[in-house]
Amino acid sequence: MKAYIKAISYYLPEQVVTNEDLVKDFPEWTVEKVAGKVGVHQRHIASESETASDMATKASEKLFSEHDIDRSIVDFVLLCTQSPDYFLPTSACLIQNRLGLSTSCGALDFNLGCSGFVYGLSLAKGLIAGGIAKNVLLLTAETYSKHIHPKDKGNRTIFGDASSATLISTDGFASIEDFSLGTDGRGAKNLIVRKGGLRQPNASGDLMFDAAGNPSSSDYLYMNGGEIFNFTAEAVPVLVEQVLEKNHLSKEDIQLFVFHQANKYMMNYLRKLIDIDLDKFYFFLENVGNTVSSTIPIALAEAQKEGKLQGNVLIAGFGVGYSWGATVLKIIEQ
């Protein structure tokens, strides 16, 4: 049985941090430098009391209302997050209860970052193909801002908080075609939050600052930007080639490429490296930033509003793990 994306909605927290706000904290930078470096002008930040499950619940409520979806049809909830409410219970169980979904509904969390939406589609497709579910609610929700040190200007300029809700069903506007997925755990140390898990449950207090005033600590998000860039440059062109081959397509058969919205410099670099025409490459991060697993569904929702989802759409996510994945969405004529 084929699986389709039926509808997508997303939620952004109320608090907005603009580049003007960041420059107040980092006067050595200018608004133009921040915008030019990462292509982000503002990002939404979860409040102190707002969690990933709160945001995923709000995205789900928007999905039901915006697309006139009867919540009683949902028979499985998948939540992708790296900032869960608790170690246990799983946040998807909390969301099932808060949304008033049937108790015959399956629910689980999975921990992935920037490849999470693509992996979630693969899980949802498997549930539908296996006859286990007919309507899967795929949620992505991330509050990376809570992992970032206040003095970490590099990561604060890039990341924003957000959530998305996507209904995958036996019918819809886009069929989910074949996947290419990959993992290389050797890169785990290059994008990591060490504190909080059972290997390092307590704060280490190892905060240090380099000569430029940039913080480094195992208690906060650490990203080796150079290594992440190198990994991306090596993995993504191969990923695109593999997913095209699996779907018996060429680059010319793709009407739109929607990549993980990491930052504008990296995306442009990949676009040129893979030789993708600018008018076939979608950007949507200027006013939301890098929202981790939510970047692709947010971009798809916006591209759909603009009438840019036509023919074959190739989506690709890549990042923390290292983890990467891609698939093709075949848009159904409406």
Image (tube, rainbow, N blue to C red):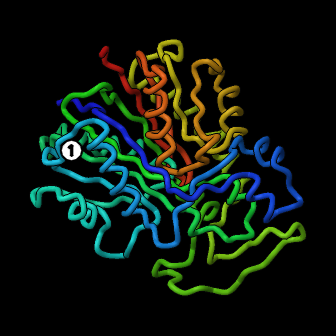
**The one of 131 and 80 positioned closer to us in this rendering:** 80
Location of residue 75 in the rendering, given as x and y in whole percent from the top left corner: 15, 49
Q: Residue at horizontal 31%, vertical 50%?
A: 60
Residue at image x 74%, y 52%?
19
Residue 250 vs residue 97: left or right?
right
109 left or right, relative to 159: left
User: Which one is nearer the viewer's eye here, 47 or 107?
Assistant: 47
The quadrant in which residue 154 appears is: bottom right
**Percent position (x, y) of residue 111?**
41, 60
Image quadrant in which you'd find residue 93: bottom left
Q: To which residue does mark 1 refer? A: 127
Can residue 254 be seen at all in this image of the molecule? yes
Above/below status of 57 relative to 330: below
Residue 280 position in % (x across, y down): 57, 19
Helix, strand, or loop for circle 1?
A: helix
Q: Is residue 186 visible?
A: no
Residue at 75 percent across and 59 percent down: it is 22
Q: Amino acid at mark 1?
A: Leu
Q: Quadrant of the N terminus?
A: top left
Q: In the picture provided, is 252 more to the left or to the right than 232? A: left
| Label 1: few (<14), some (14–19) or many (≥20) C-alpha neighbours in 10 Å | some
Q: Quarter-wise, where is residue 167 in the image?
A: top left
Q: Quick one: 288 or 120, which is closer to the camera? A: 288
